[in-house]
Image (spheres, rainbow, N blue to C red):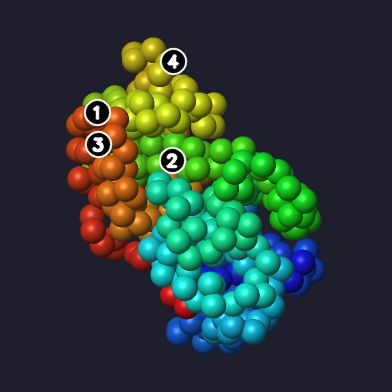
Amino acid sequence: MKTLIYGAGPIGQWLALKLAQADRDVTLLARGENLLRLEQQGIAIKDALTGERLAARVQLVDRLDPEDRYDLVVVAMSRSSRLAVCPILARNPHLRHILFLGNDVDGFHRYLDHLPPSKVLLGFPGAGGGLEDDQLTILDREKKNGKGELYIGEVDGRTRERTRAIAALFAAAGLKVHVEPNIDGWLKYHFAFIGPTVGAIFKNGGDMKAVAADRDTIHQYCRACRQAGDVLRAVGYRKRQPGVFNLYYWLPRWLEPKVFAKLFGSEVSAVRFGLHARTVGPELLEMAKDFEALKRRAGLDTPDLDALLACVPQATPETERKEVG
C-alpha cells in the first residue's frame, strides 16, 4: 500500500518512522525548515520509555500534486490544518483512501464538504510527546515491550476490506490497531478526557507532580470530565468510550485524589500528557469552541470544565512543528 504521511509534526514523523522500519512504501510530506532538517538528518525520535534514539530515512516531498497517486494518505496535523488541506486533497482524483488523524470534536461533516464518504476515515494516534530540549520525544506505549496503538473508523461505522487493509498496514509496523464502530463518539469522549487533563496541568503551571498533590484540582478535574460526559450523553453519545471513562462516575469521590494522583504523577504521564500539553493547547481551545455547540444542544452548563479550559493559554511555550500543504 503506497502511503503518504501528510504533515511532518511529531505524529507524522512517528508514523513515517514506524512504516519505514517495517519496509513499507511510505513518503512524508514536509515543508520549510522541517523539510531541510529531514533531508539532512532524516527522522530522529527519542523513545521516552527507554531513552533509545530511533532513526530512519524516508522519501520526502514538499507538496501533493493533482496527478500523484497514493493508496492511502494519512493527514497527521492539527485540526485546523487538516481542514485547510482538504481542497488540496480534493483536487487529486487518484487518492484512494484518506485517514484524518488527530483530536476532533466536530466529526466527519467538514471533511465531507470536500471529499466523498467513500474516501474518508477518522482516527487517533495512541502516542504523545513533543519537543524536549530540541529533541523530538515520543511515548506510544505503557510498557517497554508493549505496542503503540492506533484507532481508526469509517463514516458509517462498518468494517470494510479497506478498513482491514489499513489496519493490517499499521499492524505490520508494530502497532495495535483498534477499529472503532463509532470513531466520532470515541473522539468526542477523548476530548471529554483530554480537555480537563490539559486544563489541570496548565492550572498548576505545567508541573505534573503539583497536579498529583493538589486534591482540590483533582476533584475539579473529575467533575469536569463528568460534566463533559453528561453533555455527550445528553446529545446521544450514550456509550462512554473507552470503557475506563466510566471511572469518573463509578469511583467514590474520596478515592479520586489517590487514584488520579498516580495518573498525573507517573513518569509515563509526564511525557504523554505533560510534554504533549505544551503542544496541544491551541488545538484544544479550537475543539472547545466546537464543544460549545454540543453544550447548547444539551442545555447543560459545565462550570468546572470551563474553569479548567480557561487555564489553557492561547499560545503555548513550545508549539508543534506544523505542516500546512
Determine whether, in the image, residue 309 is placed left or right of residue 63: left
Using the numbered discs, state the Cα–Cα distance from disc 1 to disc 3 in whole angstroms.
7 Å
> Looking at the picture, which amino acid does disc 1 mark?
Leu
Please state which of residues 18 and 298 is positioned toward the viewer in this rendering: 298
Using the numbered discs, state the Cα–Cα distance from disc 4 to disc 1 in whole angstroms.
21 Å
Residue under label 2: 188
Q: Of label 3 and label 4, which has the lower sequence position?
A: 4
x, y percent for residue 237: 45, 30
Q: Is residue 147 visible to us here?
A: no
Tell me where residue 217 sits by quadrant. Answer: top left
Task: Name the element at disc 2.
Answer: helix
Determine whether, in the image, residue 118 is placed left or right of residue 32: right
Residue under label 1: 300
Give the residue drawn at x 65%, y 71%: 95
Q: Of label 1 and label 2, which has the lower sequence position?
A: 2
Give the residue drawn at x 37%, y 31%: 235
